[in-house]
Image: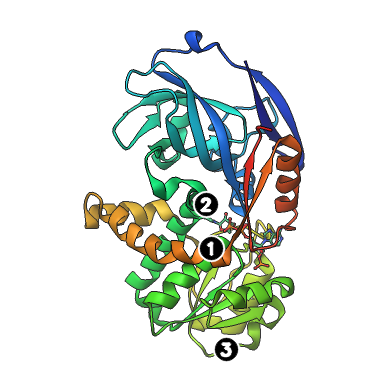
Amino acid sequence: MISEDFVVERDDLAQCKVIETELPEAGALPSEALLVKVDRFAFTTNNITYAVAGDELKYWQLFPAPKGFGNIPVWGFGEVIASRHPAVAEGERLFGYFPMATHLIIEATDVSKRGLRDGAAHRQVAASVYNIYARVGNDPAFAGRKGDQQALLRPLFMLSFMVDDYLAENDFFGAQTAMLSSASSKTAFGLAHLIHTQRESVTVIGLTSASNVDFVRSLGCYDEVLTYDHATSVPSSTPVVYVDMAGNSRLRETLHRHFGEAIRYSGRIGLTHRATSPDEPDLPGAKPRFFFAPDQMRKRAREWGPGGIDQRFGIAWDGFGPRLDQWIRIVEGRGPEAVQKIYLDTLAGRIPPEQGHMLSLLD
Ligand SMILES: NC(=O)c1ccc[n+]([C@@H]2O[C@H](COP(=O)([O-])OP(=O)(O)OC[C@H]3O[C@@H](n4cnc5c(N)ncnc54)[C@H](OP(=O)(O)O)[C@@H]3O)[C@@H](O)[C@H]2O)c1
């Protein structure tokens, strides 16, 4: 049996290809291993960030590829097609972190009613959240279109949730205006939705490209929408928190020089624009710093106790999920050619923001 794997050149992400990997016969799988067919997975700019940060954050180590190449991790669904674990049956549906491939072998461990973990040694280099699979076969929240919405947005919304929580905990650093770059991105509008619906005194301003202004306005969760070249039209004395999804060094410098000490917090979240300079100058205002979601999660796990994050996140998701039918149109692509096209279009920033791509390497 053969797995088809989509791999990219680590040093030149525009180069990509499909390779074939030999899989063992079901009977030859190691004890307690599962052979999983990767059915469908979400693909957004966040996956490009996994590739850009593949060395630094060890994403390349999770799903090994030939030397010089990497397999980009994706969130999606798989079906167990062969099992050597007594508590996991063939036909089980799993949700979690998969390679861009048709198949994955999982060394099932910590199997419970709700999920399991891949105990493969090479996967233990990353945070445990990346190795856990939820058993979702009987969960209607993970079926059909709702399931696609979970794959596309749930991991991103966890980040939105943690940033909102962090800002609220710090009383928005004394500011009443939050500025978000890449406002059309799913992670940014998840955060805008949370601030808009929960933090009445805070005004949310979205910064976006001219071509995405109409989409961002249509969401209704930003109080104001500005194109990047109008970002400094906000009076410079306005205290602001800046949440940066774009990772654009020039934009950051422009905003810091405009607002000066009125920038009360400057959080670096994403790299959608991939225009980050390795050496940024010292800037006026709050020192820009990376927001590391696992730090806030660990803190809240301690303070809120077992299940505390899940319970609060569940309530937040219940308020967000129902809006997604209006905001995101799911677009399906199957087969290597479709996957390559969406990969390259996402890399080049050519995907309209209202599209949510669900892909499969299976024809
Ligand atoms: N730190 C974390 O743990 C964490 C977790 C989740 C997400 N994130 C980050 O949040 C960011 C958003 O991810 P997402 O998946 O939500 O994005 P998405 O929905 O795919 O975002 C699409 C938007 O990003 C901008 N964009 C994308 N590619 C671009 C390019 N090549 N050039 C210029 N602009 C481009 C455009 O927005 P505009 O026109 O509005 O600029 C585009 O409409 C990513 O950088 C991701 O890594 C970080």
Q: Residue at x 73, y 75 (%)?
A: 210
* Residue 327, image quadrant: bottom right
Q: Where residue 355 appears, x then y in whole percent?
A: 65, 59
Identify the residue position indicated by label 1 in the image.
Answer: 325
> Which-is-in-front pick, marks 1 and 3?
1
Which corner quadrant of the figure contains ligand 1? bottom right
Between 161 and 3, the one lying in front of the other is: 3
Q: State the CA–CA distance, disc 2 to disc 3.
A: 44 Å
Identify the residue position indicated by label 2 in the image.
Answer: 145
Q: State the CA–CA distance, disc 1 to disc 3.
A: 37 Å
Q: Amino acid at mark 3?
A: Ser
Label 1 residue SS? helix
Say which label, 2 or 3, has the lower sequence index. Answer: 2
* Residue 229, image quadrant: bottom right
Q: State the CA–CA distance, disc 2 to disc 1.
A: 9 Å
Q: Is residue 246 left or right of residue 152?
A: right
Residue 179 in view of the camera: yes
Q: Amino acid at mark 1?
A: Asp
Residue 106, above or below 334: above
Badges 2 and 1: C-beta atoms under 8 Å apart? yes
Label 3 residue SS? loop
Say which label, 2 or 1, has the lower sequence index. Answer: 2
